[in-house]
Amino acid sequence: MIFLCKQIAKLKFFEKIAKGIQTFPYQVQLEVLDFIGYLKSKLEIENARMEEIEWSNLSLENALKDINEPEEEYSEADLKEKWL
């Protein structure tokens, strides 16, 4: 139901845009289309950057996890002699 409401709202939004640009001269309509392409490209670049940052943070977290929790190679029980 919610999905259907969102789809209807989306259609109304697209209809408003279409009606709005119908009154523009052809040259301005081309500029609007060009601007839509610019916005799409900008969003794709931003999404790619965000994905790259997320992967970088994940890699850093994994690297630091190993550094922060060093594994003990030997315990005191493994020692044969103790030095004071």
Image: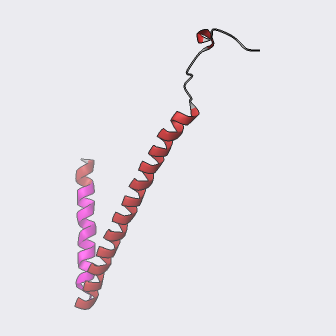
Q: Residue at x 39, y 54 (%)?
A: 51
- Give the image location of residue 55, x and y in percent: 41, 49
Q: Nearer the viewer, residue 17 or 47?
A: 47
Q: Quadrant of the C terminus?
A: top right
Locate residue 76 relative to residue 20 in the image: left or right. Answer: right
Name the quadrant containing residue 37.
Answer: bottom left
Q: Residue at x 32, y 78 (%)?
A: 35
In this view of the protein, can residue 67 be seen by the observer?
yes
- Give the image location of residue 80, x and y in percent: 63, 8
Q: Is residue 40 above or below residue 29?
A: above
- Give the image location of residue 65, x and y in percent: 52, 35
Q: Is residue 63 above or below residue 44?
A: above
Locate residue 15 relative to residue 71 in the image: left or right. Answer: left
Locate residue 31 relative to residue 71 in the image: left or right. Answer: left
Q: Nearer the viewer, residue 3 or 84?
A: 84
Q: Is residue 7 above or below residue 81?
A: below
Locate residue 35 relative to residue 84 in the image: left or right. Answer: left
What span is in magenta? 6-25
Q: Residue at x 52, y 34 (%)?
A: 66
In this view of the protein, can residue 25 be seen by the observer?
no
Q: Residue at x 25, y 50 (%)?
A: 3
- Give the image location of residue 81, x and y in percent: 67, 10
